[in-house]
Image (tube, rainbow, N blue to C red):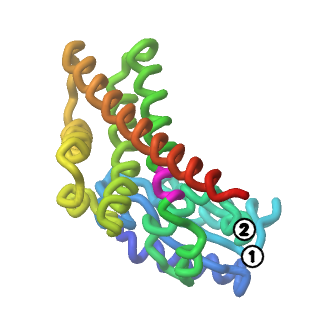
Amino acid sequence: MNFDINLWMKEYSSELRKIFGNRIWFVGLQGSYGRNEATEQSDIDAVVILDKVTLEDIKAYSALLDRLPYREKACGFISGKQELLNWEKSDLFQFYYDTLPIIGSLNSLKEYFTAADVRRAIRIGACNIYHGCMHNMVHEKSWELLKGLYKSAAFTLQAAGFLQTGKYERRRKDLLNHLLPEDQAILLIGQTLKNTNLTERKEFERLSATLLSWASDWIVRCGTTQQQTESAADSLEP
């Protein structure tokens, strides 16, 4: 029997309503199933936001998942509403655009972030990739870690594409056409690595250096913009 994400989410939502009722503020789907890009290996990145979350709620939610089929595929995020509304804004930006609504709406979140938060999302993502890439090149020397870093870069590229065009592309194939050539190259490498088994040391070094250089460029670019913004704000103070 083939897995059907729509049937699973229907049962999941029904069970949530039985347990939490009108305490549910939002239910959504993220990740490859939310983007309609899932494979047989994809996880179910389900999101549920309650009025608040207690220890008993966490235990009840875990037990709910244990009762559902394909429990091993289920992951995702549960949170209280106030925690989400006060979340780091650069993360909230990505959360808003990368979540497919199932119950409720996230439209009220859009007012919480600005262009500065988008730049911060890019900068944080690039910093994490830079650090991870450097660590991997020196210590781990792992192809799997490198693949994971290129996968992470795709999320940073979504924010970069939004900053440049004002449009958030959730699907990788749509995103590609809204990126600068140097950004397109990173996304294409990531897509190639996803289904490729490579072992050559020189190729590992080349692809690592490419990703490291790309991350470095975005860190400096966003950092310079932030410094200019802060300097302009300082000049307005009496």
Report, in whole angstroms, how far the alpha carbon at label 1 lies from the one at label 2: 5 Å
Q: Nearer the viewer, residue 218 or 43?
A: 218
**Circle 1 crowding by C-alpha within 10 Å: few under 14, some 14–19, many from 20:** some
User: Does 6 appear above or below 66?
Assistant: below
Residue type marked 2:
Gly
Write down the region rendered in magenta: 116-121
* Image position, residue 55 (x, y; %): 82, 60
Of callouts 1 and 2, the N-terminal one: 1
Figure quadrant of the N terminus? bottom left
Figure quadrant of the C terminus? bottom right
Dot label at residue 150:
none
Report the side of 33 relative to 230 (left or right): left
Q: Main secondary structure of the magenta part?
A: helix
| Res 236 quadrant in image | bottom right
User: Does 54 appear above or below 131?
Assistant: below
The residue labelled by disc 2 is 80
Q: Is residue 181 visible?
A: yes
Report the side of 144 relative to 91 (left or right): left
Which residue is most to the right?
Answer: 55
* Image position, residue 152 (x, y; %): 40, 43
| Res 31 quadrant in image | bottom left
* Image position, residue 24 (x, y; %): 67, 80
Secondary element at tag 1: loop
* Image position, residue 196 (x, y; %): 20, 34
Q: Is residue 2 visible?
A: no
Q: Nearer the viewer, residue 83 or 140?
A: 83
The residue labelled by disc 1 is 51
Q: Is residue 94 magenta?
A: no
Which residue is most to the bottom?
Answer: 22
| Res 14 quadrant in image | bottom right
Q: Are marks 1 and 2 in contact (CB under 8 Å)?
A: yes
What's the residue at 46%, 60% (across, down)? 44
